[in-house]
Image (tube, rainbow, N blue to C red):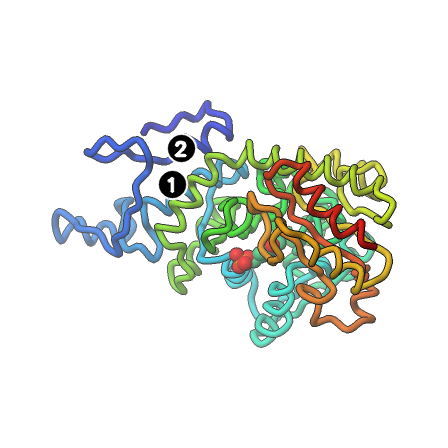
Amino acid sequence: MSHDNDWRPATQAIRLGHQRTAEGEHSPPIFTTSSYVYESAAQAAARFSGDEPGNIYSRFTNPTVRTFEERLAALEGGERCVATASGMSAILATCMGLLQAGDHLVSSRSIFGSTVILFDKYLSRFGIETSYVPLSDLEAWERAIRPRTRMLFVETPSNPLMELGDIRALADLAHAHDCLLVVDNCFCTPILQRPLELGADVVVHSATKYIDGQGRCMGGAVVGDGKLVGEEVFGVLRTAGPTLSPFNAWVFLHGLETLAPRMKAHSHNADLLANWLENHPKVERVHYPGLPSHPQAELAARQMDLPGGMLAFEVAGGKEAAWKVIDAMKMISITANLGDVKSTVTHPATTTHGRLTPEQRAEAGISDGLIRISVGLEEVADIQADIARGLDLL
Ligand SMILES: *Cc1c(COP(=O)(O)O)cnc(C)c1O
């Protein structure tokens, strides 16, 4: 299918990148082939040297993966996207491509647990040191920057408390100090937040979450310009091989086709649920960027098109009460995955944040009564009824 540069991103997410084969298929096929055949020895040589564009080997060139990459790049407003085997390998490939021994990284404190382990246990072995700062404290970010700081890394909104980092302000700070700003945009997707438009240099994704949208496949992606992502991050992928499989790419590229309406529906349901929870007598506090009570509601309205599908709430009575509410649920799944059409619930203090000491949890604001919901696309009255069952027991 021909490219049309006039298409808007939502159209590109549905139409871009599929080169129809001689079979005339309407839906993009899965190319499960590890290598490609050339007309002649000279053509093989031209492909390998880069003189002729085209497929070489599926570790770094595959038509199904490329279709997914072109669509996600269009949605994020980036020049290039590199798809990876998981969200974690997207973050690893970004760090390997853009940092070197002796460099320093500043990250928001409340990021995905495995990202902390990647920075502290593994990157540190290769001479890259990480400092952590409170997400919304711009002065703390600035104080943490050293002469060898090369990257600021932020995840916004944070998990599970839905705090926000000001992407535009962080991009300005990064660039004033000759650093790159990398944004983990997993919770919002480009439908709700486009960090590159706000000045960020690189966006990373776990496609496992909303981009899949139905909890089936693992995958990730890095989006940015032709140099940082098209050369540096692509070079790591090409050489080290944390490659997205064609099957998973096929699932995700169909996920992108419905991403815009799904994100709007997730956000709509979460907004209704957050307002209902905030008025419930057994709920002490609700953390949701769409509520006027959110301490950064103004930033949320400025930076995000909609407040998204993730929320957390607190009940009195600590872990015992929180577990009672969770165990009374008959529909909502107790599972760590998020961004699924099915609503899911976690108790952060004993799962995702269970490895922290009680003091660290208190410092991070994760109370024992906190419950996180990834709001799905079931009828919102059924989600409410499932949560009400447990709240009524308190
Ligand atoms: C899940 C997640 C990741 C890691 O992605 P995987 O696909 O599980 O490797 C990174 N960041 C955030 C915010 C996530 O939710």
- The x and y percentages for residue 359 are 83, 71
Hey, which quadrant is residue 60 in on the image?
bottom left
- The x and y percentages for residue 51 are 27, 47
| Residue positioned 77% across, 59% down in the render | 322
- The residue singled out by tag 2 in the image is 16
Hey, which quadrant is residue 380 in on the image?
top right
**Circle 1 residues within 10 Å: few <14, some 14–19, many ≥20:** many
The number of numbered discs placed on residues in the rendered structure image is 2
| Residue positioned 47% across, 55% down in the render | 218
Disc 2 marks which amino acid?
Leu
Front-lying residue, 157 or 209 = 209
Q: Residue furthest bottom?
A: 125
- The x and y percentages for residue 28 are 33, 38
| Residue positioned 50% across, 60% down in the render | 89
Vertical order, 280 against 178 (above or below): above
Asked if the residue under mark 1 is in contact with the one under mark 2, i.e. CB atoms within 8 Å, the reply is yes
Q: Which mark is residue 67?
A: 1
| Element class at badge 2 | loop
